[in-house]
Amino acid sequence: MVQILDGKAMALQIKDEIANEVRALTAQGHRAPHLAAVIVGTDGASQTYVANKEKSSHEVGFTSSVYRMPESTTEAQLLETIEFLNNDPDIDGFIVQLPLPKHINEQKVINAISPDKDVDGFTPINIGRMVLGEECFVPATPMGICTLLKRYGIETAGKHCVVIGRSNIVGTPAANLLSRKGFDCTVTMCHSKTRNLAELTRQADILVVAIGKPEFVTADMVKEGATVIDVGIHRIPDESKKSGYRIIGDVKHSEVDAKCSWTTPVPGGVGPLTIVSLLQNTLQAYKRMSN
Ligand code: NAD
């Protein structure tokens, strides 16, 4: 029978651990860790993500600040804000919520973030360190996937892991981390030009799906007994819900789950662990600053 990788419960447990650590630090007279976020424009999903990060920061006792900038912000103005945050000794880590408006060069902005405060793990320095297996900030979503696998004791060594998606924030770092020592999977990375995708996914002991297409993965694409990690998040209109929508993933759970040994629900799987990973990275940045 399928077992659930319960990201929601695990996130609560890790938040508790972080909150205890923060309480101990502040009881000793230290200041609390401080996570800042920069958001440009009014994109609804981005506003929700930043609000959730702010709420979670408060829950664990962090100081949190949000820099809200209008859609018309120029690249130069945003770079100035980043320079300010890089140099503010009271801020341990910060994120720039993506996507940015089209007139701003996203990579240029990411490159301007100090690697020591890059708690999203998006700067070339942190990605390079991750690939070399050095100490670094690991991007939050793949870090959340790794935490779920580790804490649930899912066996990964020598397993065939197929990752669908090669984005810089999910697929590529997930494939890298799962192939490294500690996880030791044999990894196949699939993308939009992959041929015979289903033939590959059917070989997966562990299938990580980050394709960004609602319910794309169907039962015929999954091996019996596989562990399926669904990274996708999609809002689908649903009049039966008070909010007017429901959240679904990249996997058609109604038919896939029966074949799995383990699966992540959507919502409540990878999502909560993503936010928690950001908090863990911020605590790590704080400790580095204090040393
Ligand atoms: P993306 O759009 O940047 O990347 C999608 C990837 O899928 C691309 O690399 C592309 O090559 C690949 N792809 C597209 N069509 C394909 C096909 N037919 N066959 C094989 N590969 C194909 O998306 P992303 O930023 O990596 O996000 C993926 C999903 O995860 C989205 O639904 C996003 O909302 C969600 N997401 C969730 C979290 C979380 O916290 N749970 C975090 C980030 C992203």
Image: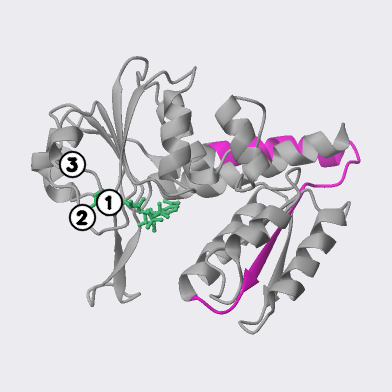
Depth order, front residue of 256/125: 125
Is ligand 1 less than 8 Å from the beta carbon at label 3? yes
Give the image location of residue 81, x and y in percent: 78, 67
Which of the marked residues, 2 or 1, is nearer the chain's N terminus? 1
Q: Nearer the viewer, residue 104 or 117?
A: 104
Whether disc 1's CB lies below 8 Å from ligand 1 is answered yes
Pointer 2: what residue?
215
The coloring applied to the image is one colour
**Residue of label 3:** 197
The residue shown at (62%, 74%) is: 40
Dots 2 and 3: beta carbons under 8 Å? no
Q: Nearer the viewer, mark 2 or mark 1?
A: 1
The residue type indicated by label 3 comes to Leu
Residue 280 picture quarter? top right
Contact between labelled residues 1 and 2, with CB atoms less than 8 Å apart: no
User: Could you tell me the amino acid type at mark 2?
Assistant: Glu
Give the structural element (helix, strand or loop) at label 2: loop
Side (left or right) of 23 relative to 291 = left
Residue at position x 40%, y 43% in the image: 171
* Mark 1 / mark 3, whichever is N-terminal: 1
Q: State the residue position of label 1.
A: 192
Assess disc 3: are there few (<14), some (14-19) or many (≥20) residues with their C-alpha within 10 Å of its C-alpha: some
Which sits in the foreground, 232 or 193? Answer: 193
Magenta residues, start to end = 14-43
Determine whether, in the image, residue 150 is placed left or right of residue 262. Answer: right
In the image, what residue occupies the spot 36% across and 20% down?
156
What's the CA distance linking mark 2 and mark 3? 15 Å
**Res 10 visible:** no
On screen, residue 287 above or below 70: above
For the residues marked 1 and 3, what is the alpha-carbon distance in whole angstroms?
A: 9 Å
Q: Quadrant of the C terminus?
A: top right
